[in-house]
Amino acid sequence: MGRTHSYSLLNMPLFYGGLPFRPRLVGVCCRHQEAAEAARQEWGYAYACTDHRKLLEDPAVEAVHVCTPNGAHEEMVLAALAAGKHVYVDKPLGRNAQETARMAQAEAASGRTCQVAFHNRFFPSALRAKALLEEGALGEILCFRGHYLHSGSIDPQRPFAWRFDREAAGGGCLLDLGSHLLDMMYFLLGLPEAVHCVTRVLHPQRRDPQGVLHPVTAEDYAVMTLRLPNGALGTAEASKIAAGSKDGLHLEIHGTRGALVLSMDEADTLQYFDAQAPELPLGGLRGYTAIQTGGRYPAPGGAFPPGRSATGWLRGHAHCVYTFYDALYRGVPGSPSLADGHRVQTLLDAAYASAREGRWVEISSPPQ
């Protein structure tokens, strides 16, 4: 993720012409000096270090990117805010709602610009879906369904690592993939009021690279039923055992006036169905319309690459990073904020509680 964020910073002047600001890469920190020095040389940072506190003590550093494993987010985010830095942090914001609440509280008290890297919000297709929903194009939401599918945990010979340890990672596929999916649902539909969840661990034990056997406590599969405040019901599925899947986030939303289908496997189009179109003989023009969003970002984006060009995974990250620095420059809150990351975490915590207890769990709504 450090490479991904650096790519976004380095390419910002190309993607967004005529910017009144330009990020300067000051320092990069890794656990090992060799890796830090390699990153410095390859990406153009002024210096490399192995102690993140050096970055926080440097007055030349105005903003920090936290790209560490989940368990290190709270310490580093709180330290950065205490040092007066602006913060851009990878998802999920933390391992539980206790951690994320402390970060959201620190954000509110700091006056700094903060943002969580929920990059799937930042594809033109997702932004267009948000606009259509805000315009009321779907009417009242009736039902929805979504999934985020990977296949990396099917192989029983895959070595044990920190991601298979619930305590170290904070969770499994529900936290890792489900956080993206649930954030997209929150972004488009608002925070659900209740959740019912079931999870599964496919291989209960794995050997580490040294051959030592470890219990696997982080789930490989999770399926949820969600209820919105208006009574609409939907499903959300997160899996790392879906054979044939690579990085498939998919969401369908149905309302009284129409429907949307948003798929990151086909990120250049948004499928929109207008239920108000007349049913003429032979169908008329009634049916799903493939809106060609492509890379058509609003100015100053969208000129390079041309809007007609296909978008990719890195482009969503680049627009997410740009949005953070644009907010920083204008002195306004970032979005999604740490408070938004906390709201998503309350939903994740409720899902985990449901899986443990085998019941519907109400979702506490943090202050706006």
Image (spheres, helix red, strand yellow):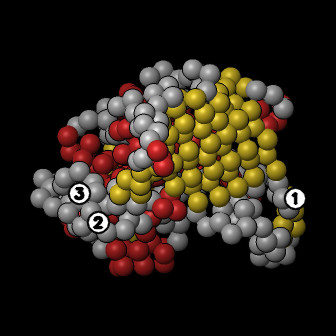
Count all numbered tags in the image, as a single digit.
3
Q: Mark 2 points at which residue?
A: 308
Residue 179 place in picture, x, y as percent: 58, 45
Residue 351 relative to residue 315: left or right: right
Residue at screen point 26% across, 42% down: 327
Inter-mark Cα distance, 3 to 1? 47 Å
Question: The residue under label 3 is which amino acid type?
Answer: Gly
Question: The residue under label 2 is which amino acid type?
Answer: Arg
Q: Which of 142 and 154 is in front in this view?
A: 142
Residue 229 place in picture, x, y as percent: 58, 21
Question: The residue under label 1 is which amino acid type?
Answer: Pro
Q: Mark 3 points at which residue?
A: 301
Q: Mark 1 points at which residue?
A: 204
Q: In this view, does 86 lie above or below 43?
A: above
Q: SS for tag 3?
A: loop
Q: Is residue 40 above or below residue 18?
A: below
Residue at screen point 32% across, 60% down: 295
Residue at screen point 52% across, 32% down: 255
- Residue 362: quadrant of the picture: top right
Badge 2 crowding class, 10 Å Cα cut-off, few under 14, some 14 to 19, many 20 or more, is: some
Q: First in sequence: mark 2 or mark 3?
A: 3
Frontmost of labels 2 and 3 is 2
Q: In this view, does 322 lie above or below 128?
A: below
- Give the position of the C terminus as an image quadrant: top left
Whether residue 271 is visible to the viewer of this picture, yes or no, is yes
Badge 1 crowding class, 10 Å Cα cut-off, few under 14, some 14 to 19, many 20 or more, is: some
